[in-house]
Amino acid sequence: MNHYKPMRFLLIAFLLSSISSYGQDDPQKIIDKFFSLYSTKKTNEAIDYIFSSNKWMNESKDQIENVKFKLNSTLKLVGEYAGYSLMTKKTLGEHLTLYTFIVRYDRQPLRFSMLFYKPRNEWQLQNFSYDDKMDEELDEAAKAYRLKENFDE
């Protein structure tokens, strides 16, 4: 039976390596894990996780820390987390996809935007941003000059 141990070790190592890279073959899997961490108040871990999908982000540790600091500062002002919903998903070909989410809090919502890029076979985070300007945009969209019935035909 001892001759099976190396094979069992190789099988376990293969399965573990498959699991660790599995999340990068689909942006939705990366997003699901991000929000799973985020919803359990592990904001810093969620940010570290999503940026870890892009090996080029390792050189941007200061920027990642800045995102975490600013987001955590914002979260102190918006109340308790109440969930998230997909606002829109836009694609540009097969290699670039933008997901925009409304992240709900007691006081006000935040918008999270996540741009994913697939240079070869795996998806990676290309850009992450958040803001609280949705109310201003909705107000602008409701202006009379923007309404369909006011367009010249």
Image (cartoon, helix red, strand yellow):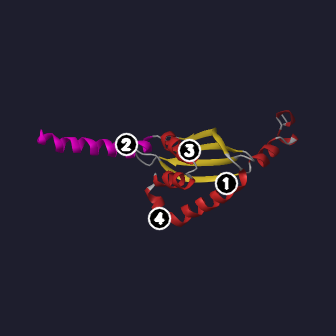
Q: Which residues are drawn in magenta?
A: 1-25
Q: Position of residue 39 (x, y in %)?
A: 58, 45
Contact flag, marks 4 and 2 (Cβ < 8 Å): no
Element class at badge 3: helix
Q: What numbered label is drawn on residue 33?
A: none
Quick one: label 3 or label 2, which is nearer the N terminus? 2
Quadrant of the image containing the C terminus:
top right
Q: For the residues marked 4 and 3, what is the alpha-carbon distance in whole angstroms? A: 24 Å
Q: For the residues marked 1 and 4, what is the alpha-carbon distance in whole angstroms? A: 26 Å
Q: Position of residue 72 (x, y in %)?
A: 63, 57
Element class at badge 1: helix
Is 33 within the magenta? no
Q: Give the residue type at disc 2.
A: Ile
- 125 vs 78, left or right, is left
Q: For the residues marked 3 and 2, what is the alpha-carbon distance in whole angstroms? A: 18 Å
Q: What numbered label is drawn on residue 35?
A: 3
Q: Nearer the viewer, mark 1 or mark 4?
A: 1
Q: Position of residue 5 (x, y in %)?
A: 17, 43
**x 40%, y 42%: residue:** 22
Identify residue for label 4: 59
Element class at badge 2: helix
Say whether residue 87 is visible. no
Quick one: label 4 or label 2, which is nearer the N terminus? 2
